[in-house]
Amino acid sequence: MKHTDISFLKNEATKKDYLNQTVTVCGWVRTSRDSKNMAFMEINDGTTFKHLQIVIDKSQGVENPEAMHLGTSVKVTGTAVEGRQGALEINAQEIEVLGTCPADYPLQKKRHTVEFLRTMPHLRGRTNLFNAVLRVRSVLAQAIHSYFQSKDYVYINTPLITGSDCEGAGEMFQVTTNGFTKEYDNAEDYYANDFFGKKAGLSVSGQLEGEVAAMAMGKIYTFGPSFRAENSNTPKHLSEFWHIEPEVAFAELPDIIEIAEDMVKTVIRTVLEKCPDEMAFFNERIEPGIIDRLTDLINNDFGVCDYTEAIRLLKESGQKFQYPVEWGCDLQTEHERYISETVFKKAVFVTNYPKEIKSFYMKQNDDGKTVAAVDLLVPGVGEIIGGSEREADYDRLVAAMKERDMNLDLYTDYLELRKYGSVPHGGFGLGFERLIMYVTGVANIRDVILYPRSVGSIR
Ligand code: 4AD
């Protein structure tokens, strides 16, 4: 269908090419207003955050009452003229209704709660909020690829179906083609007869295979979905989330921290540059001050704080936390937010966690108690990155796995990497939706992805 994207008419650099020209535009009607001699509607085609005003002179016989209903899809031909504040608008010559939209269209009023919109994932993209979120998401994705590609990282696609559980936490969705049956009386028999001849699941992380790739390609990153079957019905957990996992050879924990900080700052700077309209909307409607907060973030160093120090700060805070704080405990969101929001008032890396609360693959520190782990905590969200230097020593890794009663047979590839030319290396995982929450100020992770999956909810 020959037409012009509204983004071209709204773009300061290209709009002059359309001034006083006849153009055809398409879109969904977002607002409409009727008066005696004139009618107005604003349409949006999704190519830009901004709506395009259509001016209808009733005396010209172009009026189309059906087109005035919100949600109707239209094709409009007319002359592009300069309207209020220099923005182009269209003096309509012809309005064609592509798809009518009856009065039960749910997005009638201007403002809806996110809870209401969550009940209609197929329509909520047509609101300003989701228009802005989905475009920021797209720009962030591109910025992440550009960041790594510009630094010679190789983009790797790791398998989604796996026979090993990366985090060792056993919270995997199972992949099976065997239906409900009484044929097998034990699990071993069941899996032996299943599709892969052994137990399989959806990967919780591409890290283990990412390490395989890094041991050949040096610097790699993945960008794909991860699946977690954990029963965490919180505003920051999804069962299916998008995960960015760089893995770097010849790198120790401080190198990993440096990469994470540089990447986060770079991609946020890109969003501030490329999405001014969307960010202005978030600043006005979702989180006042967010643009200043992000600008501060990219212009200042992130904090770094040892876990042991973090525990001391929490214990001395005088705050009443729902989850008690003791050395050895995992940091809960309330603790993470206190550290980043109240103590540091900025993004902060917490390092060197107790080995008992972290994964088997993390490099064991010389103190015998902690591992070279790092989490990045940000105000408003809490953890957005989890990473570590990896245990590169074969014997120490085997010992850590045995301590956790892991089945070493499932990790032969991973262990062999430590046998054939092992090197210090590390990486991290960035939760894409958590980053989007942080950048947009949207408080619930279900509102930064087209179709959220969470415990008890799929559509
Ligand atoms: O801290 P996590 O579990 O670390 C890993 O998966 C490592 N294998 C990463 C690595 O070193 N390559 O997860 C990393 C990040 C978290 O910081 C969080 O941002 C996000 O992934 N994440 C989730 N996001 C949404 N919903 C969930 N259920 C998430 N679980 C983790």
Image: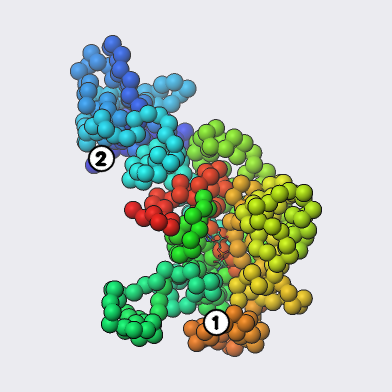
Q: Secondary structure at mark 1?
A: loop
Q: Position of residue 227 (x, y in %)?
A: 45, 64
Say whether residue 156 is visible: no
68 displayed left or right of 386: left
Where residue 456 sits in the image (x, y, percent)? 40, 56
Q: Does 355 sit above or below residue 82? A: below
Along the viewing direction, whichever of 230 and 361 lies nearer the viewer: 230
Query: What colour-coding does the image apply?
Result: rainbow
Q: Residues within 10 Å of mark 2 (few under 14, many from 20)?
A: few
Q: Amino acid at mark 1?
A: Met
453 to 299, vertically: above or below:
below
- In terms of image quarters, where does ligand 1 lie? bottom right
Find residue 2 and name its label: 2
* Picture residue at 22% right of the left edge, 36% below the top: 99
> Please, what secondary structure does the residue beneath circle 2 have?
loop
Tell me which corner region of the image, top left, top right, bottom left or bottom right, holds residue 217.
bottom right
In x, y percent, where is residue 23? 30, 31
**Which residue is pictured at 60% across the width and 39% down the height?**
290
Q: Amino acid at mark 2?
A: Lys
In the image, is the residue at mark 2 within 8 Å of ligand 1 by its beta carbon? no
**Mark 1 or 2, which is nearer the eye?**
1
Task: Please give the label number shown on residue 192.
Answer: none
Residue bearing the label numbered 1: 406
* Lower position in the chain sequence, tag 1 or tag 2: 2
Side of 28 relative to 84 (left or right):
left
Q: Is residue 47 depicted above or below 229 in this figure?
A: above
Rendered residue at 35%/43% (across/down):
120
Picture quarter with the N terminus: top left
Mark 1 Cβ and ligand 1 under 8 Å apart: no
The picture quadrant where one finds residue 203 is bottom left
x and y, in percent, of residue 425 in the image: 63, 74
